[in-house]
Image: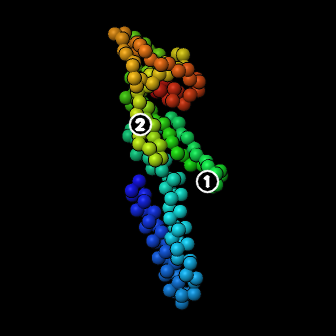
Amino acid sequence: MFVELIATVFAGIACAGVVMLLNITTGRRLPKWIMPIAAGAGMIGMTISNEYTWFDRTAERLPEGVEIALKVDEEGWMRPWTKIWPYTKRFSAVDTGTARRNENLPDQRLADIYFFGRWSPISQAPMLFDCATPRSALLIDGADFGADGAVANADWQTVPADDPILKLVCEG
């Protein structure tokens, strides 16, 4: 976040510098208000660029075995251009490389899910999936594993059969 702030400030300085050079080459004929307008436009442009490139930059740095399952695009009236070109604000990824199975319960899979947000820290949670009857349980509090591998006290939630996270875990 700090690097983006510095980049935005330097983009404003660069745009103001270009206008200053144009003003000098035209014999100082440009109006005085054009330099701060150019600096502001450069800073706004850099901010918009950072919003639209965040997802690609973050996704390319994911380690091997972590696959993106779900993207959430954002639109808003305060950013009218997002009505035409929405940007990705959040996404979920599954660590398929470390997904585990239990021999006693072959239809169940345990995988780590990562939640990424533009201005929020990365969250990780283990999640249990039942591929035979499409359902999942977040294993954060109170879930106990039995000797046979069954999970007691899991809060199972029914999920649609075409859920992208379920498909990624069960097909992997």
Instruction: Spot the residue most to the left.
Output: 147
Q: Disc 1 on helix, strand or loop?
A: loop
| Neighbours of disc 2 within 10 Å: few (<14), some (14-19), many (20+) | few
Residue 89 rendering spot, x and y as whole percentages: 52, 45
Amino acid beneath label 2: Ser
Tell me the residue that label 1 is attached to.
78
Q: Nearer the viewer, mark 1 or mark 2?
A: 1
Are the residues tagged 1 and 2 within 8 Å (C-beta)?
Answer: no
Residue 86 rendering spot, x and y as whole percentages: 60, 49
Looking at the image, which is closer to me, 9 or 72? 9
Numbered circles on residues, count: 2
Q: Residue at 51% of width from left, 26% of height from top?
A: 166
Q: Is residue 67 visible?
A: no
Q: From the viewer's perspective, is residue 134 above or below residue 24?
A: above
Disc on res. 50: none
| Neighbours of disc 1 within 10 Å: few (<14), some (14-19), many (20+) | few
Rendered image quadrant of residue 100: top left
Residue 25 rendering spot, x and y as whole percentages: 52, 86
Q: Disc 2 on helix, strand or loop?
A: strand
Amino acid beneath label 1: Met
Q: From the viewer's perspective, is residue 16 above or below residue 63?
A: below
Looking at the image, which is closer to me, 80 or 87? 80
Q: Earlier in the sequence, mark 1 or mark 2?
A: 1
Q: Residue at 61% of width from left, 48% of height from top?
A: 75
Q: In whole angstroms, how far apart are the C-alphas of marks 1 and 2?
A: 27 Å
Tell me the residue that label 2 is attached to.
123
Q: Residue at 43% of width from left, 58% of height from top?
A: 4
Residue 6 rendering spot, x and y as whole percentages: 40, 62
Instruction: Spot the residue most to the bottom.
Output: 27
Q: Residue at 41% of width from left, 30% of height from top?
A: 125
